[in-house]
Amino acid sequence: MTARSPGRAQQICFVAASIHAALVVPLSLAAGSGLPFGLDAYAPPIGHARELLGGFVLAVVTGYLLGRPSRALLGVLCVSWLLARLGWLLDAGGPWALASQGAFALAFTASLAPKFIGSGRRWRNLAVAPLLALLAAASVALDGITGNLALVHQVMILLLAILLAFMGGRVLAPAVTTERERNGLSPAVRMQPRLEGTIMALLTVTITTLAAGYSPLGGAITIAAGAVAAIRLWRWRVWTCRARADLWCLGAGHLWLSLGLLTFGFALARGSGTSSALHLLTVGALGTFTFNIMLRARLQRTQGEPARETLLPAGTALLAVATLARYAAATPGTGNTPILLGIAAAAWTLAYVALARRLLRT
């Protein structure tokens, strides 16, 4: 089998993910508002969560980790992902929808998890393989769940938070260190493996406690994970890279991750609603990370310069607006909820439409 260029495979996955992200949020808003053109397949909470977490995010992860696939493997992944997206449109809640998402989850796990298995690897790297498998399984559960949807939703977001803590540090830490050395400053603290491992371990315990029904304990542990994530970000000293807006944008993703974990933890500990806190993790952390990592990866692949890419700070700012508006809309007692939801959807969609256009040109 002939191999496809890794850059081409990456571009296909990233463009598909960006277009899907730009479509899903306004379609979900329309479905949730009962508008005539709304599609039930995208209605919140199930449709919204399934398409963003099981469709958009997994497509980004595939493009980022896939490497140099054969044409056959790339075809299987693309076709199974597309069929999974069409599954609920044509057979919402039916066996085809579940089978199509299951086929993509199986291809996703089989193609990506083995990359993190091998002798001599540290436990944090080895942990990524089961993490990817659990993410894939959770995406299927979002399709076929008939019980505690909120728990599956929370678990999948926490699994993604672990992945963000792991992969995000591997992007930001070396870039900050290189920039500081270029400016004659002492190197920043690099990967901080102990703090990274602590975050991964704490969130794993949180997932276990939530599954066992001990939400207040899970909240306390999540607060600890958020605090460790904040310490890790502080020690990178991103603010010293004054001429690198692209690094500040990556730092913003880590900031949303820390704030989201802290807010989610406090909500669990108090026994209050977690919807607003989860949107800090999804719109804020996931949205900012995926936007920046996709565009940054493509620029590096095509000899572009992230430091000069104006879309990175512009998109990060739009996603900040979307995050704050969505958080406010989900917070009890906040007025003008429809307006806030519209602002959040418009800012998110504009960011990802711009990203898709930019990716098509790389």
Image (spheres, helix red, strand yellow):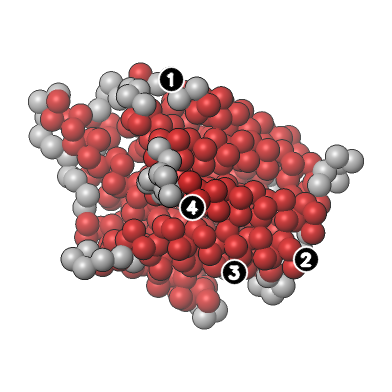
Tell me if label 3 and label 1 are in contact, CB under 8 Å. Answer: no
Q: Residue at x 61, y 36 (%)?
A: 19
Residue 59 as seen in the image, left or right of residue 165:
right
* Marks 1 and 4, the one that precedes in the sequence: 4
Q: Which residue is mark 4?
A: 73
* Marks 2 and 3, the one that precedes in the sequence: 2
Q: Which residue is mark 2?
A: 94
Q: Residue at x 46, y 56 (%)?
A: 160
Q: CA distance from mark 1 to mark 4?
A: 34 Å
Q: Which residue is mark 3?
A: 151
Q: Residue at x 44, y 70 (%)?
A: 206
Secondary structure state at the residue bearing disc 4 = helix
- Residue 315 screen position, x and y as percent: 50, 28
Secondary structure state at the residue bearing disc 1 = loop
Nearest to the eye among marks 3 and 4: give it. 4
Three-letter residue code for mark 1? Thr
Three-letter residue code for mark 2? Gly
Q: CA distance from mark 3 to mark 4?
A: 32 Å
* Marks 3 and 1, the one that precedes in the sequence: 3
- Residue 362 screen position, x and y as percent: 45, 25
